[in-house]
């Protein structure tokens, strides 16, 4: 059955002159059929570089597809399931962000890519978990406003010795806050020879206990280190799929087997096929918001090239 659907997808992709982009947290079968798999920064860069295609099918969550639509206004951007939202992206409101800016005049605003398009239009620059410290370091200010992930804001401030004003106070990824220090303690006991890596969206106590703190893209690179044979991975379990596929001679253990993002798993092969066939669900961003958001995204991309 899957083979038939895969053939349909390949034919439709060719007919529609489309490219399939997938996040590291996508299900195994989606990762395997995608043209490119990466973290948020890598996907932003890839979307900005695609030429000679008419359609981008984004296998991820809503803010990712919105970002692609902003970067590529001449392309049709499709998300196979329009319920694939990111809870964190909805945690900061436009009013909240504007209030923080008005109370801190002249202080630059750094917005995590895990945010909606209208919020991005209020940012001076965007960051991802892979480049947050680099973005913050580039600011000509000892202070910065950061939204919406509290843990990444704290981490960025620590890495750069700057002061972060974080909005909202409780912004978080429910998957990464599920991970607890006792999970690392247990992993040390069960896998004494393993290295442990966690995502910067994790709590500070967890970051301090881990051997490494990396974005998912950083984890992919770390996994290739010839000195590392066994790695405990503190992020959404979908990344372990990619790590195992690319490093079959190594062992990768999820820090928690229930570290599972429900909306990342909404996209299936059937939905991907239907999205290509029916050209749904189209993701659009209004011109006024897109033009402002594009400035802050381009600033980040220019730092990353």
Image (tube, helix red, strand yellow):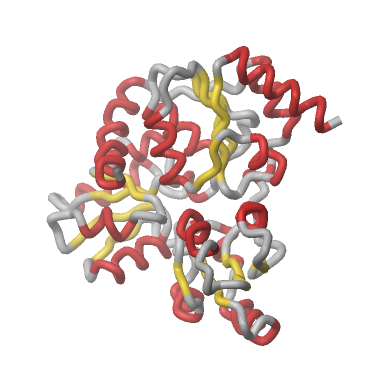
In the rendered image, residue 59, in percent from the top left (x then y), is placed at 59, 36
**In the rendered image, the vertical position of residue 281 relative to residue 296, given as above or below:** above
Decide which of 132, 107 is in the foreground and name it: 132
Q: In the figure, is residue 246 to the left or right of 144?
A: right
Decide which of 215, 145 is in the foreground and name it: 215
In the rendered image, residue 8, in percent from the top left (x then y), is placed at 74, 21
Q: Residue furthest top?
A: 15
Say whether residue 229 is visible.
yes
Q: Which residue is drawn at the image coordinates 45% and 19% (left, top)?
A: 75
Q: Quadrant of the C terminus?
A: top left
Q: In the figure, is residue 127 to the left or right of 265?
A: left
Say whether residue 252 is visible.
no
Decide which of 27, 98 is in the foreground and name it: 27
**In the rendered image, the vertical position of residue 236 relative to residue 228, given as above or below:** above
Q: Which residue is drawn at the image coordinates 27% and 63% (left, top)?
A: 164
Decide which of 134, 195 is in the foreground and name it: 195
Q: Which residue is drawn at the image coordinates 55% and 21% (left, top)?
A: 18
User: Image quarter for residue 141?
Assistant: bottom left
Q: Quadrant of the N terminus?
A: top right
Q: Which residue is drawn at the image coordinates 16% and 63% (left, top)?
A: 142
């Amino acid at each position: 059955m899957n083979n038939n659907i895969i053939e349909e997808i390949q034919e439709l992709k060719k007919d529609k002159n489309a490219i399939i982009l997938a996040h590291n947290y996508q299900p195994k079968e989606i990762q395997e059929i995608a043209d490119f798999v990466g973290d948020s920064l890598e996907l932003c860069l890839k979307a900005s570089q695609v030429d000679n295609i008419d359609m981008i099918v984004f296998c991820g969550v809503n803010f990712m597809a919105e970002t692609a639509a902003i970067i590529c206004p001449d392309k049709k951007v499709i998300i196979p399931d329009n319920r694939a939202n990111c809870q964190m992206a909805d945690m900061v409101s436009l009013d909240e962000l504007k209030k923080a800016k008005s109370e801190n005049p002249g202080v630059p605003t750094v917005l995590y890519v895990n945010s909606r398009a209208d919020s991005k239009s209020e940012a001076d620059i965007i960051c991802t978990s892979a480049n947050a410290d680099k973005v913050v370091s580039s600011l000509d200010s000892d202070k910065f406003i950061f939204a919406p992930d509290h843990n990444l804001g704290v981490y960025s401030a620590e890495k750069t010795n700057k002061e972060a004003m974080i909005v909202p106070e409780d912004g978080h990824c429910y998957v990464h806050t599920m991970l607890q220090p006792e999970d690392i303690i247990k992993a040390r006991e069960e896998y004494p020879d393993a290295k442990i890596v966690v995502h910067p969206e994790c709590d500070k106590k967890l970051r301090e206990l881990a051997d490494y703190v990396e974005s998912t893209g950083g984890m992919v690179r770390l996994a290739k280190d010839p000195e590392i044979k066994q790695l405990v991975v503190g992020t959404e379990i979908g990344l372990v799929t990619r790590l195992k596929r690319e490093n079959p001679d190594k062992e990768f253990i999820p820090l928690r087997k229930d570290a599972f993002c429900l909306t990342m798993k909404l996209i299936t092969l059937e939905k991907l096929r239907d999205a290509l066939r029916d050209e749904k669900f189209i993701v659009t961003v209004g011109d006024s918001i897109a033009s402002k958001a594009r400035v802050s995204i381009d600033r980040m991309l220019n730092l990353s090239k």
